[in-house]
Amino acid sequence: MKVPRLMATQHPDSTVVLMPQDEVEEAIQDVLPLERGGRGCDEKMVDYEGKATPYNQMRDIIEESKNYDIVPGEDFLITPRVPNPKLEDKDRHLLAITAAVTANMYSQMYFNTNAIKYIVLPMSANTLEIAEVQRRILRVERLVSEEFSYRLEEWIRLIPLFETAESQSHIDEIVESLRIALIKEIGLFENEFRIFMGKSDSAIHSGHIASSIGIRTGLLKLWNWQKETMFKVYPIIGMGKPPMRGHLAEWSIKDWVEAYKGYYTATVQSALRFNTDRKDYVNTIKHIVENAGKKPPLELLDLSKKMVKIASGAGEVYVQRLDRLADSIMFMAKLVIRTRARLDTYKRKAKTGKEMPRAIRFCASLYSMGLGPSLIGASVIDELAKGNAQDFEDLLKYLPMLPIDYAFDLAYTDLDVFKKYVDEKTYEMIKKDVEIVKEYFGHVEPPRRPEDIYFKKLKELRESVEEADLSRAKAIIVELAEMRGFLG
């Protein structure tokens, strides 16, 4: 299997506004080689999860490829993320699958290739449900093959996307269960799997420490699973620029490739493509490619049970804080611009039961309030260090990026501004988190520091909110995002 290394996505985390009519040309530029002025990715995710993406977009990308002398299915793949029928309307789920299959008809017609070899299912959980979606894909392929000129040379494989720390922490058991379910339910014997793990939604649900542990544990367990079996697994990790969303950024790339060793494919999200200087962008993706497929330190598996327990405790502290912050975050999220055409009907709830904005607007809201999101609930490290110093040392060995994650978010935090958005009790809880992080990691040099104008703009934003000058507030949020290098 030739495994893609760089998956360009349509995450709305950049300050560049792109509507559906812009996304075909964007996709072409994403997959054009660096030497031709493109962005050098070898896989393009066309996203239908909660997003108003036209169903003909995959076909349009295939047809536009003819004008650039690139071959979909050979030079790059198109991989749609379809709605999960448990969370979104079933017709959108089925229409996205059908659009993927029929797009392959045109790929065969123009290039004699299949541009779409995989489909991503977000928020995967139950293995039987995953198997049902795989069976649904096969049925649609058979239907199109019987009714139209579609050659069934190879099945489109499903990539399950796991987005909770809990599922990632026992992902080896899930994949083994899925392997068996595919045989029993469909008669499909698979010996190679692409498994996707996301950081963002996991972080919103459980906090930065727990979600980081989930990804690290998942990578270790997937590699160990393939070592103990005759099967192959090719992990994909989905991360964005802010620490809360994975800290896959140009300023942290050398640390990142070591901290998350074991990935085969990494997402190259919009902010990395559009809010990064060309030279830094090229350096970043070269590091990703050069380090893809490297074996992680499997000896860390000895710490995994301890780490999962730490993740559970850290998650509980985080959720307590989140419950108190929820209303302020929801208020600020309304001021964050939409840079992609998303559906208002698709919503997510936090563990508190309260509605939360999606990860990008969540992070953008907190930075705009003067708080680095990864700091929420971080005071748990004090209890860890004082309770058992070895546990604290093991945590830093397991999560080597944690110090620079915190250093970055400390550099972008202004508690004097943040205090004006929340009640006194909430402020004191977050203040404790920040002070503990300063105590343990205040000596760590942040990988990037904002200039003084950043904090001036934070104060201006607060004044605009107080004066109900919402158009000005929205503009300042974008200015702050451009200074950070990402929206959220």
Image (spheres, grey):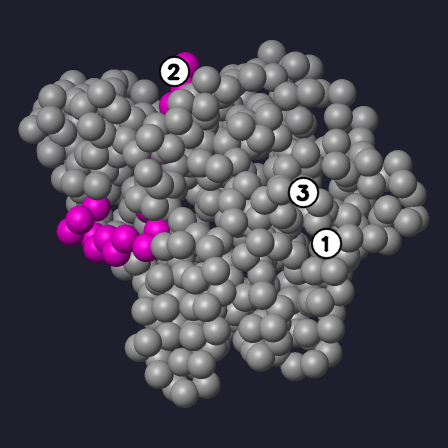
Compared to residue 310, the image places residue 92 above or below, namely: below
Quarter holding residue 428: bottom right
Q: Earlier in the sequence, mark 3 or mark 2?
A: 2
- Amino acid type, residue under disc 1 in the picture: Lys
Mark number, residue 403: none
Residue 2 covered by magenta stretch: yes
Q: Residue at x 28, y 31 (%)?
A: 39
Magenta-colored span: 1-23
Q: Residues within 10 Å of mark 3 (few under 14, many from 20)?
A: some
| Image quarter of the N terminus | top left
Circles 2 and 1: CB atoms closer than 8 Å: no
Residue placed furthest toward the top: 230
Asked whether disc 1 touches disc 3, contact meaning CB atoms under 8 Å apart, the reply is no
Q: Residue at x 20, y 28 (%)?
A: 37
Rendering coords of residue 184 (x, y %)? 55, 29
- Image quadrant where residue 460 sits: bottom left
Q: Position of residue 427 (x, y in %)?
A: 68, 74
Furthest residue toward right: 387
For the residue marked with disc 3, what is the amino acid?
Val
Gap in Å between the C-alphas at discs 3 and 2? 40 Å
Residue placed under numbered mark 1 in the picture? 438
**Kind of residue at disc 2:** Lys
Residue hosting label 2: 2
**Mark 1 vs mark 3, CA separation in Å:** 9 Å
Q: Secondary structure at mark 3?
A: loop
- Left or right: 229 with respect to 366? right
Instruction: Indicate which disc, 2 or 1, sits on the residue closer to the N terminus.
Output: 2
| Pair 3/2: label in front | 3
Q: What SS does tag 1 mark?
A: helix
From the image, tell me which residue sits under label 3: 444
